[in-house]
Image (cartoon, coloured by chain):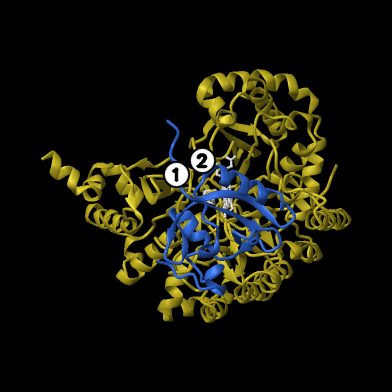
Chain colours: A yellow, B blue
Amino acid sequence: MYRYSEFDTAFLAERNAQFRAQVERRIDGSLTEDEFKPLRLMNGLYLQLHAYMLRVAVPYGTLSSAQMRQLALLAEKWDKGYGHFTTRQNIQYNWPKLNDVPDMLDALAEVGMHAIQTSGNTIRNVTADHFAGAAADEVADPRPYAELLRQWSTDHPEFQFMPRKFKIAITGSENDRAVIKAHDIGLQLVERDGVLGARVIVGGGLGRTPMIGKELSEFVAFDDLLAYLEATVSVWNQIGRRDNKYKARIKITVHEHGIDAIRAKVNERFLQVRPQFKGADMNLLEEIKGHFAAPAFREASVASFESAYTNDPVFRSWVDTNIAPHKNADHAIVTISIKKHGQTPGDATAEQMRVMADLAEEFAYDELRISHEQNVILPHVHKSDLPAIHAKLKEHELATANIGLISDIIACPGMDYCALATARSIPVAQEIATRFEDLKLEHDIGHLKIKISGCINACGHHHVGHIGILGLDRAGVENYQITLGGDATETAAVGDRTGPGFAYDEIVPAVERIVEAYLDLRDSAEETFLETYRRVGMAPFKAVLYPEARANAA
Amino acid sequence: MARAFTPKVVTANDLLEGDVIYQTEDDSWSRDLSEAELITDEAHAQVRLLDAARQANKIVGAYLADAIAGDKGPEPTHFREDFRRTGPSNYAHGKQETSPQPRV
Ligand code: HEM
Ligand code: SF4
């Protein structure tokens, strides 16, 4: 049963040859679109508004420099010189031609990559914190546990005929960077009396009915976890709704029955299934852990870093916003912003991809990560290398110091690419970033997350943005709804609607009014937007957004 | 009461290129909306959509899109169709890159 890489070389070669033949049969007319569509979707090929789109998987968001270089090659050779990193920790190419896709897949296979999509009502890929294995605040690297869950669920009978698809996210830290409360099941690794286990959250999700997950168990020791999760899924299999696609997700089951009732049923079921688990999975876990072993961190002086930090204000500003603490004190986690003001969030050119690959190879133990916030991460960097990395990034427009700030916006492709969209999201993100760059207010505003989706599918996670923006089609014109107070972290919350939406040319000024109100209202420069919102509530923001309503009421 | 029929064009994506195409009166496909056949009769629209569906080895996802007569041929009535005939707004890619499709 043990397979580290889900798809080995021989399997990928065979799959790609099959798909090549299917493409040929579609082109010569022996396959209809109805027959071909499910086949292309399984291979990550979608048809969007203006062209096909190929979605390439990046398991656990982790890439080597060779893989990143190959992504650059695909962008250059078969696309328009760039790729789009998404909130699902994968990369999308927006302009492939049908004839070229088999060659693209073969090129991916050369570096062990593929575009195969998990689909259907099964457990989708398990996602993990993008700082996994590097973060100073983690109890343990969550990726081996994620991989164990994925392997264990793949051919498991309980998971083949679920009411609906199912997504699991795992973090090893209390600071939640994996949005575990917006997944069907969220796991936070915790240690109790020397025993590693997980806090289990259930019933979160975004989309048309956003819900924040609830705590099912405070602590399940790890050797009981698979049994406990099997019990959970089994309860849902029994009582989940299969009559209505929109009511089938476990979040609805939890909402309708209540978390306490679900917990009681899970505990009962757990006692029944527990004896079937005999610890084989724990041996497997040890084996998997070997594949996620940390590199041998090098030892060197950090003096050059400290002098650059003291003497170079631009470097200092970048370090202050884009660097996170590493578990090895002489190392750091670098987040490379691919959101220079005015650029499309998540887009990187082939040249930028190569620069990042070179940096990973030279300075970062050959490892890169993609974050669900659409940035690229060098998870392990010795601090003495930070000045050289920063200098190189600057040459390629990759040194924007904006992580966690107002221009670090998540935006889905929206109506500029997506066939399902009801409005655009990319230009709204571009204009907000440019506007606040012009005002030179970004660093003063501080931590503020804006998230934008172009329809209710919520690919841009707008519900959990501090400021969320949802683009809709109102009587044939774009209209944008605003929510405030959403939160994607351990204090997760779904944002509250401010009221009527705003037209395309009113949305950026509306955001500006919200931010101005915050700057007036905050206690001190230390109080973040979210803290202020939680303290003062919606009313003062409504007042600046809808002054005419107040005038009318008066 | 049934809604009054509004003029339509038949549009789809090209099978190989994936780009947006429009059915013309002489039963070929154009990349330019202004060259499309503007259909003003509902029954005729259904016939033309069936004509399109028969060309499954050239096109994908044919449907009827609202349009109105303009100076130089059909024009979109909805912003989605306006984007489809132009390209994305973040780069000058798509049709705006190759054929003159001024955005108004
Ligand atoms: C452009 C092609 C895309 C299409 C057609 C598409 C379609 C969809 C649909 C239909 C759903 C809802 C699935 C369901 O609940 O059954 C969904 C969910 C989602 N999409 Fe996309 N999407 C696209 C691109 C993206 C991109 C570029 C991102 C990342 C920026 C993304 C991230 C997500 C996420 C995170 C969810 C899950 C939201 C949740 O928790 O419910 N998608 N997508
Ligand atoms: S949220 Fe809607 S518009 Fe945005 S990518 Fe998802 S499906 Fe498309």
In the picture, residue A216 is in which quadrant? Answer: top right
Q: Pointer 1 indicates a residue of which chain?
A: A
**Disc 1 packing (10 Å; few <14; some 14–19; many ≥20):** many
The residue positioned 38% from the left and 45% from the top of the image is A475
- Label 1 and label 2: CA atoms lie apart by 7 Å
Label 2 CB-ligand 1 distance < 8 A: yes
* Residue of label 2: A206
Marks 1 & 2, CB-CB < 8 Å contact: yes
Task: Please tell me in which quadrant of the rendered image residue B94 appears.
Answer: bottom right
User: Where residue B9 sits in the image (x, y, percent)?
Assistant: 54, 53
Residue at the image position 62 percent from the left and 77 percent from the top: A351
SS of the residue under disc 2:
loop
- Vertical relation: A387 (above or below) A419: below
Q: As drawn, is B28 to the left or to the right of A211?
A: right
The type of residue carrying mark 1 is His
Pick whichever of labels 1 and 2 is earlier in the sequence: 2
Q: Which residue is mark 1?
A: A463
